[in-house]
Image (cartoon, helix red, strand yellow):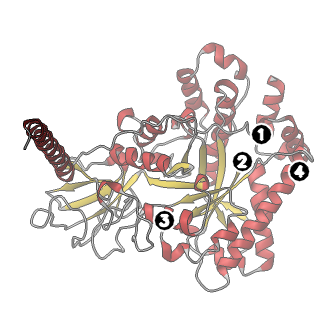
């Protein structure tokens, strides 16, 4: 062989060997990195580096039991600059008439929050900012303060938050089947929803029927309900704003997040009338389960390494499976799909993690569910977690945090800032509309760095700012005073706004 060829061959071999060594080194580093991830309890998925002008929904459900001990959580504890939607839970269906009724009149419309609200205002705003709203008085109750805060933030900060009334809920689930089977009650329900929404100043209606049965009647009744409500909302908009009205009032649906219940609903037909689908992607595991699991997991046990998105229908109970069903099977615009997150944990007692697998919270036997949230067996508010004396761990495969108390053998699964980071990135990478939390009182308001909402905001960066509420318009003021005169819940509030302007 010619000496020149031998030199070139030798050079080629050296380059080839060097390349192989570099590849082996790279593969080894990747393997070690993956190994560390699988062993780490606090792995954090990096925030997306894709800058976008897209805005995302940040919704909170606020319950009318929040002001009571031990929660002591009031509307003014919510940072309106960080949210786009507040869902007020719950207005209930009276099974005798079909009309909506308050589940707690004192909390809804009587609680005196004037002193606390004033103190809050002086902490949140400057004296110059408050000059424009000095003579405006907040209506009573949680509903009144929410109306007041919505107006104040719109006026001073140009932050426009939608205030939505949520109808039904788990405790009121038996009233839906009764109401939809009686034509008079059904008509009363539709009219009462519209009347109650306007009377109390809500920007829309959120339906929470848990859940229609697969009996060939209830799913169609739900469709009819959505259609009639949407029609009446559009008529109301035209009546108030005239022929050139824009879409103002929202109709959303708190939706089951597992195939067995989703498949019952005529989702494709419903989508014509529903503005937002609030998927309740939590409560996958609890006292009803045969074995333990994380109740708000994004992926199921078959989830692939590195969170490669699955698109099969057998992915089990997980947020990803529910999103996949809605977007890929039902062809719902992903921007209308809102990922639900839980500001609480679900637990199991008498769990033996040490002798099984201390790094796997799934598939363990349990007896009892414990709980530290008053009146809610098996539940802990997020701000009560991790259990004192326990260590918080993280399951990156399923996306969720958990803690285990060695003394009581109690296992609790929940969302923490790490899982919220991953879920926020999931929302952006899948072009979803945003996220909501059940419920506001569960988040921590004393530790901003650990707050679930704050974490979400840091990742998505841009919270949706809605159009100014219709309740700030002259046309609505005229309509309200004409229809309710001195008897309206918001009459004095609206007159103050008119006088101030």
Residue 61 seen anywhere in this rendered image of the structure: no
* Disc 4/disc 3 C-alpha distance (Å): 36 Å
Residue furthest top as drawn: 128
Q: Secondary structure at mark 3?
A: helix
Q: How packed is label 1: few (under 14 Cα within 10 Å), some, or many (20 or more)?
A: some
Q: Is residue 357 visible?
A: yes
Check if mark 4's residue and mark 2's residue have beta carbons within 8 Å. no
Task: Evaluate if marks 2 and 3 touch, with contact meaning CB atoms under 8 Å apart.
Answer: no
Left or right of residue 415: residue 489: right
- Residue positioned 50% across, 54% down in the render: 339
Residue under pointer 2: 203
Front tag of 1 and 3? 3
Task: Assign a secondary structure to mark 2.
Answer: loop
Q: Quadrant of residue 309?
A: bottom left
Alpha carbon of mark 1 to alpha carbon of mark 2: how far?
8 Å
Report the side of 102 relative to 494 (left or right): left
Q: Earlier in the sequence, mark 4 or mark 2?
A: 2
Q: Earlier in the sequence, mark 2 or mark 3?
A: 2
The residue wearing badge 4 is 238
Q: Which mark is residue 471?
A: 1
């Amino acid at each position: 062989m010619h000496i020149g060829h031998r030199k070139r061959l030798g050079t080629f071999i050296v380059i080839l060997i060097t390349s192989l060594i570099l590849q082996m080194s790279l593969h080894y580093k990747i393997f070690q990195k993956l190994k560390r991830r699988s062993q780490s309890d606090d792995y954090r998925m990096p925030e997306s580096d894709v800058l976008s002008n897209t805005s995302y929904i940040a919704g909170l459900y606020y319950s009318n039991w929040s002001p009571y001990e031990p929660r002591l959580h009031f509307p003014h504890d919510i940072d309106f600059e960080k949210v786009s939607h507040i869902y007020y839970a719950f207005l209930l269906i009276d099974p005798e008439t079909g009309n909506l009724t308050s589940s707690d009149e004192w909390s809804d419309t009587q609680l005196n929050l004037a002193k606390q609200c004033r103190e809050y205002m002086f902490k949140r705003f400057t004296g110059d900012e408050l000059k424009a709203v000095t003579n405006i008085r907040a209506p009573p109750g949680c509903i009144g303060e929410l109306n007041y805060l919505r107006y104040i933030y719109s006026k001073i900060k140009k932050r426009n938050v939608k205030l939505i009334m949520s109808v039904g809920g788990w405790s009121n689930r038996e009233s839906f089947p009764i109401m939809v089977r009686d034509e008079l009650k059904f008509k009363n329900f539709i009219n009462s929803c519209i009347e109650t929404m306007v009377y109390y100043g809500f920007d829309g209606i959120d339906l929470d029927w848990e859940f229609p049965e697969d009996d060939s009647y209830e799913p169609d009744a739900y469709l009819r309900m959505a259609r009639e409500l949407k029609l009446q909302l559009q008529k109301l908009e035209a009546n108030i704003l005239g022929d050139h009205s824009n879409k103002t009032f929202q109709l959303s649906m708190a939706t089951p997040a597992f195939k067995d219940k989703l498949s019952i609903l005529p989702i494709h037909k419903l989508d014509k009338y529903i503005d937002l689908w609030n998927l309740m992607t939590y409560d996958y595991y609890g006292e009803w389960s045969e074995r333990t699991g994380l109740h708000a997991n994004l992926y199921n046990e078959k989830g692939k390494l590195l969170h490669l998105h699955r698109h099969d229908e057998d992915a089990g109970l997980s947020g990803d499976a529910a999103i996949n069903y809605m977007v890929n099977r039902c062809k719902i615009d992903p921007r209308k799909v809102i990922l639900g997150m839980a500001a609480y944990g679900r637990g199991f007692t008498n769990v033996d993690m040490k002798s099984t697998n201390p790094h796997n919270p799934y598939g363990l036997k349990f007896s009892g569910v414990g709980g530290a949230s008053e009146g809610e067996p098996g539940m802990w508010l997020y701000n009560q977690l991790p259990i004192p004396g326990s260590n918080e761990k993280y399951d990156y495969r399923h996306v969720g945090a958990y803690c285990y108390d060695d003394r009581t053998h109690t296992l609790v699964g929940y969302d923490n800032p790490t899982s919220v980071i991953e879920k926020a990135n999931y929302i952006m990478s899948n072009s979803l509309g945003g996220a909501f939390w059940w419920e506001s009182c569960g988040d921590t308001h004393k530790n901003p760095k650990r707050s679930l909402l704050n974490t979400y905001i840091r990742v998505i960066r841009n919270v949706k700012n809605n159009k100014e509420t219709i309740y700030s318009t002259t046309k609505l003021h005229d309509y309200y005073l004409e229809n309710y005169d001195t008897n309206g819940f918001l009459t004095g509030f609206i007159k103050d706004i008119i006088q101030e302007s």
